Amino acid sequence: MSLQEFGLLLISVLISIAGQFFLKMGAIKLGKVDTSNVVSHILSIITTSELLLGLACYGVGAIAYILLLTRVNLSVAAPAVSIGYIFSVLLGYFVLKESISLTRVCGLGLIVTGVILVVWRK
């Protein structure tokens, strides 16, 4: 994977992570869904700005990913996108104050190792 291709991958992942963040912020604003409020929550989705922004980010991230797929094999691009898990966990930890267990840190290390092995060319 060239530096330009890696940059496109990173843009796709970071925009998608931003989408996840905004979807989470919108979900927090909506509150918990149960059988008594499911219809009103579904209708509230279209008026919650964080949710709309999150969906827009996902759309832009998907476009960047499609552009990446024009240059890189799927067998490289798809596993490489898993670096998004690392950013998601870090965002949860630093912004949302979620805890990170040692098991999760080990899992993230395995993901990083796997991505390096997948994208590395000799």
Image (cartoon, rainbow, N blue to C red):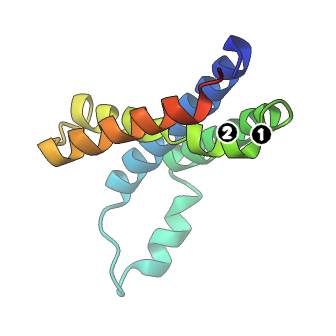
Q: CA distance from mark 2 to mark 1?
A: 6 Å
Q: Residue at x 50, y 42 (%)?
A: 82
Location of residue 11 with respect to 50 vertically, above or below: above
Q: Residue at x 59, y 58 (%)?
A: 46
**For the residue labelled by badge 1, is the local secondary structure a helix, a strand or a loop?**
loop
Left or right: where does residue 58 sit relative to residue 36? right
Badges 2 and 1: C-beta atoms under 8 Å apart? yes
- Mark 1 residue type: Asn
Left or right: where does residue 71 sit relative to residue 96? right
Q: Residue at x 17, y 41 (%)?
A: 100
Residue labelled with disc 2: 77
Does the rendering let one see residue 14? Answer: yes
Q: Position of residue 68 (x, y in %)?
A: 76, 32
Residue labelled with disc 1: 73
Q: Residue furthest right?
A: 70
Between 30 and 109, the one lying in front of the other is 109
When asked about the image quadrant of residue 101, the answer is top left
